[in-house]
Image (tube, rainbow, N blue to C red):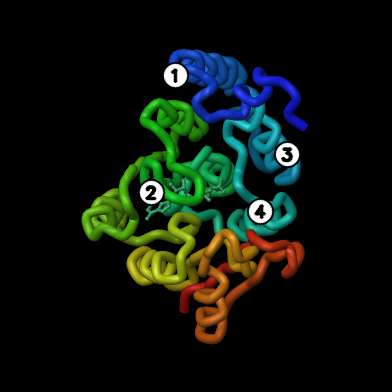
Amino acid sequence: MISTERELHALSPRATPRWAQIARRLARATRAAWRLRELRHLTRPEQSIEEIVDAVFTFSGGFFVPLQIKSEVVAFLRMVEQARPKAVIEIGTARGGTLFLLSRVAAPDATIISVDLPGGPWGGGYSYARVPFYRAFRWASQKFHFVRADSHQIRSLDRVRKLLPDGQCDLCLIDGDHSYEGAKQDFAMYGSLVRSAGLVAFHDIVKHATRYRAGVDRLWAELKLAHRHVELVEDWGQGSCGIGVVIRD
Ligand SMILES: C[S@@+](CC[C@H](N)C(=O)[O-])C[C@H]1O[C@@H](n2cnc3c(N)ncnc32)[C@H](O)[C@@H]1O
């Protein structure tokens, strides 16, 4: 219960002055930068996938927290590790959690491309200030690229294609625009870059609680009829999340 005017003020989005928000963000980023080595040193097979996932979930107050269910992302990473992809596209990076995790199970010389729309729905993208943090994850011989743009623009697709060493990739994770039409368009555009036997993964194949108005579950229901696939879902009644993986013919 709110009992004082001060408590009421604290709940208002305008309560914290801009300078204080910036100072807080700077302090968080400094703390994260200071501890980054703890994450960089996590490698396979020295650490288990569970240990690596736990570490990124809890790192520096959730600085890179993945927007995932742990058991699902662990199962997904196991599958990806078997494929050891050399070229990866991630549509929807947000705080960088899955980007970090993918870098741990991809090939040591993989090219990994993040496509994310600044201020985009379902996570808000990331600012330029975060790019050096994301770059700091990678192994010396991995290449990271950041396309901060709408995945649906043909220009974004062209940029991604040019960044791929041979114009194709082994894995594409679609976790950006969660509408039926948006995810379908991502599949049509970026799925076409995935080589035969490569993987196209979708996050949020579980029907969302109605207030979120996502449509990946509807798209998934269609795709699973037409493609070889794997479903990694903790509980079909959980109201969001779930990972579906299409294996390209
Ligand atoms: C749910 S978050 C991604 C979470 C991340 N994969 C993880 O698990 O940690 C979704 C991201 O997609 C981005 N996004 C939404 N629509 C997009 C679009 N049309 N193009 C590119 N990115 C988009 C948002 O900016 C947001 O950062």
Nearer to us: label 1 or label 4? 1
- How many angstroms separate mark 2 from mark 3 (CA)? 25 Å
**Label 2, residues with CA under 10 Å away: few <14, some 14-19, many ≥20:** many
- How many angstroms separate mark 3 from mark 4 (CA)? 11 Å
Residues at discs 2 and 3 in contact (Cβ within 8 Å): no
Please name the residue shown 66% across and 53% down the image: 73
Q: Amino acid at mark 2?
A: Val
- How many angstroms separate mark 3 from mark 1 (CA)? 33 Å
Residues at discs 1 and 2 in contact (Cβ within 8 Å): no
| Image quarter of residue 9 | top right
Q: Position of residue 195 (x, y in %)?
A: 40, 68
Q: Position of residue 108 (x, y in %)?
A: 51, 42
**Label 1, residues with CA under 10 Å away: few <14, some 14-19, many ≥20:** few
Sequence-wise first label, 1 or 4: 1
Q: Amino acid at mark 3?
A: Asp
From the Cβ of disc 4, is ligand 1 less than 8 Å away? yes
Residue topped by disc 4: 73
Q: Position of residue 207 (x, y in %)?
A: 63, 69
Q: Please tell me whether mark 2 sits on a helix, a strand or a loop.
A: strand
Residue topped by disc 3: 54
From the Cβ of disc 2, is ligand 1 less than 8 Å away? yes
Against 79, residue 65 (above or below) is: above
Q: Amino acid at mark 1?
A: Arg
Q: Amino acid at mark 4?
A: Val
Work out which quarter of the rendered image holds the N terminus and state it.
top right
Nearer to us: label 1 or label 2? 1
- How many angstroms separate mark 1 from mark 2 (CA)? 28 Å
Residues at discs 2 and 4 in contact (Cβ within 8 Å): no
Sequence-wise first label, 1 or 2: 1
